[in-house]
Every structure is written in structure tokens, then in C-alpha cells.
Amino acid sequence: MKKIKISVEVSARHIHLSQKDLEKLFGKNYQLKKKKDLSQHGQFAAAEEVSTVDDPRYKFRVVGPVRPESQVELALTDAIRLGIEAPITLSGDLKKIKPQLAIKGPRGTIKVKAMVPKRHLHCLTSEAKKLGLKKGQLVKVEIIGARGLIFDNVVVRPENKYSLSCHLDTDEANACGLGKVCGFGFLIT
């Protein structure tokens, strides 16, 4: 068994928007304003936030750039609090999900699909090859510390623009005492 030190990041609840839905929420021809770059190439936290219609205090940061289809990514705790059933699936795998969460922006509202993203490992295609990993493969990631855990079923997601990092949701990060944004762990191969 081999252990490789990797970055582990916390993915808090957020929303990805299509251009069509962005315009419904913020107005015609609206463009996202970048607040800060995220660790994965081309991804950014936008300045814009939206909220649920039922509870305007329940907010979601918009993550850019725009996507072909809108989706809310949240933790299971969020889904319970919102009273919805959000399936655990890979980000972007929305075929079997029905829009169920009403979202409000300054210019309008939309109904969007909500999901809990499967824990996953981003990496460059070349890193995956070097490490003997394949797209969709399930691996383990170990977090060391007072609340250390080994996470099973971490999905490998190689692409030419990704950097090596495991993404956990806030429930998972809290369970292992990871902290608010980023820490490290070990990929077990």
C-alpha cells in the first residue's frame, strides 16, 4: 500500500448557473463578476450570491464560469434543512434529477436541480497515468489528525486542466476536523 500526500479542499454549498438562468436571476446579458480564483484552473468564486425563495437567509455563492445547465451543490445537512431529497452524484450528472429548489436573485427566480456531490479526486490526466489511476476509479483518502478518517469511494476525475486535490463537502470536512477551506491528506493506492 502506497500513500501520496495530497491537498484536500472543502467544497461549501454553491450554485453553478447556465447563462439563461443567470439572466433570469440578474438581468439580460448579465456577466459574472470574479471575486477570486479557485484552485481548479478556470473556476472562480463570483461576487454574486443568490438565496432560496423560502428562506432568503439561506445563501449560495455563484461559482463560475457559466455551465450548460444550472445546479446547486450542497451537503446532506443542507438538504435536510431545506426539506429536499438531493441525490449523491457526480457534479454535472443531472439527467435523473428534477428541479426542486426555488432560487431568488435580484431580478427573478428559477427552479434548479440540487445534488450532493460525490467526494472526488481531481488530477491532471498525466498525473492519473503516472499514479496508475483511471477515470471513475474509486480510491481512498486518509485524513490525519484528532478526528482522522479514511474516506472510501473517492471518485477519480482526471482532466488536462485539474490540479491534484480531493474535494469533500462541509459535512465530510467537519467529520474529520479538516477546517474551513483546505488541508492535506494521503491518497491510498
Image (tube, rainbow, N blue to C red):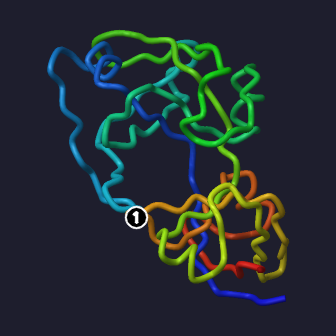
Q: In this view, does 66 lie above or below 6?
A: above
Quadrant containing the C terminus is bottom right
Q: At x 35% / y 53%, what residue is drawn?
A: 43
Quarter occupied by residue 46: top left
At which x and y percent is residue 140? 79, 70
Which image quadrant is residue 74 in?
A: top right
Foreground: 179 or 161? 161
**Where 60 sits versus 145, above or below?**
above
In the picture provided, is 62 more to the left or to the right than 188?
A: left
Question: Which residue is pictured at 41% across the width and 62% down the height?
Answer: 40
Which residue is labeled 1 in the image? 160
Q: Name the residue type under label 1.
A: Asn
Q: Where is residue 158 in the image (x, y as percent from the top left)?
A: 53, 62
Query: Looking at the picture, how far across and down is residue 116, in whole percent?
Result: 68, 38
Q: Residue at x 58, y 37 (%)?
A: 73
The residue depicted at 34 percent of the width and 43 percent of the height is 64
Along the line of sight, the residue nearer the viewer: 160 or 166: 160
User: Which percent across, then down, holds residue 86?
Assistant: 72, 28
